Image (cartoon, rainbow, N blue to C red):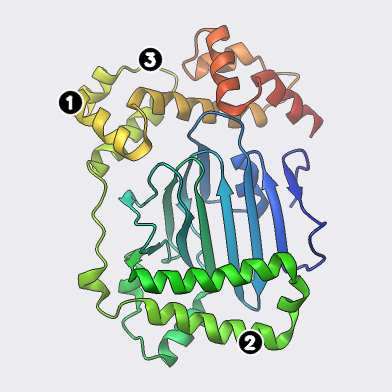
Amino acid sequence: MSVKKSKISQDKSRTNNQQITSLSFTDVDFFTEFFGYGGMQMIQLTVGALHSKFLSIRIGDLHFIYNQANQGIQTWGEDLKKYRDFTMVWFENEGEFYSHRRPIDPQRTIFGFNGDEVDFLMPQGGTIANILIPVETFHAYANQLQRHDLDDCFLSKNYVNLLPTGMREIKDYLKEIFWLAEHKPSYLQQDHVVDLVTNDFLPLLISKIPIKWNSKSSLKPSRQAKLIAQAEQEMLASFEEPLTLKQLAQNLESSSSALSRGFKDLFGMSPMRYLKVRRLNALRQRLKASNPENCTITMLAGQFGFWSAGHFARDYKAMFGELPSETLQKTAKV
């Protein structure tokens, strides 16, 4: 798999440890391409050039990941099926995190661990931490600890609320891992440290999951989540056609005010602003897949509902920090 150096930079100055990867991303498409997530998609939601930091630490079979982005990100699609993915909010800025359209409590919620499908919203300036655990490894430790309740039914819930003290203990452990990766990376390569971390961390994580998770771990879905999902499908089917908020509401047999409230709650923007964001992201992907010699930006913009070349160029640059022609030129260089 090729990595486009113009978009991805790997920090090799910190460590020669091949188990530690430090990357910077300026394009969400290259994040998914780097990891080969063929079934997963990401788009940028907020305005401005993207700067994302990614740190991955592999210790034995476990992966500890830190991911920060200065812009809001929406992610959906297939997840990594061979891993159990335990994700938590590491740092919260203004804005709310959502998993499967449910609001996340940064102080309590661990989410995303069923290894089936991801549906995640990260606000502008947010940071998350992931622990990827091979399926067999997770179940082996759960069985050793007689946590037979952590079965497929539990995993299909995609989220669980811990006690705040339990979340703090897990984060404190992760802080040590991240610190060692930056300051003493060779220490993490030693065989006894690999065994120590595996035998310490997995029992810690599993023990902090409440046994009675069915009754105490419920998260309420975001308001009007079903309606918003239907609205998204309508938008995707209307990229090349004009669409007003009134028309969208009529198609869904809803009210404009209900749609506006729902999109504001979930995405932090109006339905029509969200439609423009989706169109800009889709057009950017098309530009990067086009042959610069045969691509006419004005005609391509029209296919996505942008009829004014001047307004489109302005909106595109505000969204991604570069003009459409600059995106096309970078494609040509690659």
Residue underneath mark 2:
195
Between the residue at mark 2 and the residue at mark 1, the CA separation in whole angstroms equals 57 Å
Reply above or below: 194 against 213: below
Camera-nearest label, 1 or 3: 1
**Residue at screen point 25% across, 43% down:** 226
Q: Earlier in the sequence, mark 2 or mark 3?
A: 2
Task: Please name the amino acid that badge 3 sits on.
Answer: Pro
Looking at the rendered structure, the secondary structure element under dot 1 is: loop
Camera-nearest label, 2 or 3: 2
Task: Please name the amino acid that badge 1 sits on.
Answer: Ser
Q: Residue 93, can we see it? A: yes
Task: Please name the amino acid that badge 2 sits on.
Answer: Asp
x and y percent of residue 32 in the render? 60, 48
**Residue at screen point 66% across, 39% down:** 26
Looking at the rendered structure, the secondary structure element under dot 2 is: helix
- Residue 255 marker: 1
Quarter of the image with the C terminus is top right
Q: Quadrant of residue 316?
A: top right
Q: Earlier in the sequence, mark 2 or mark 1?
A: 2
Q: Is residue 175 left or right of residue 263?
A: right
x and y percent of residue 58 in the render? 66, 71
Residue underneath mark 3:
242
Reply above or below: 15 against 139: above
Reply above or below: 33 against 48: below
Label 1: how many Cα within 10 Å (few below 14, some 14–19, many 20+): few
Q: Earlier in the sequence, mark 1 or mark 3?
A: 3
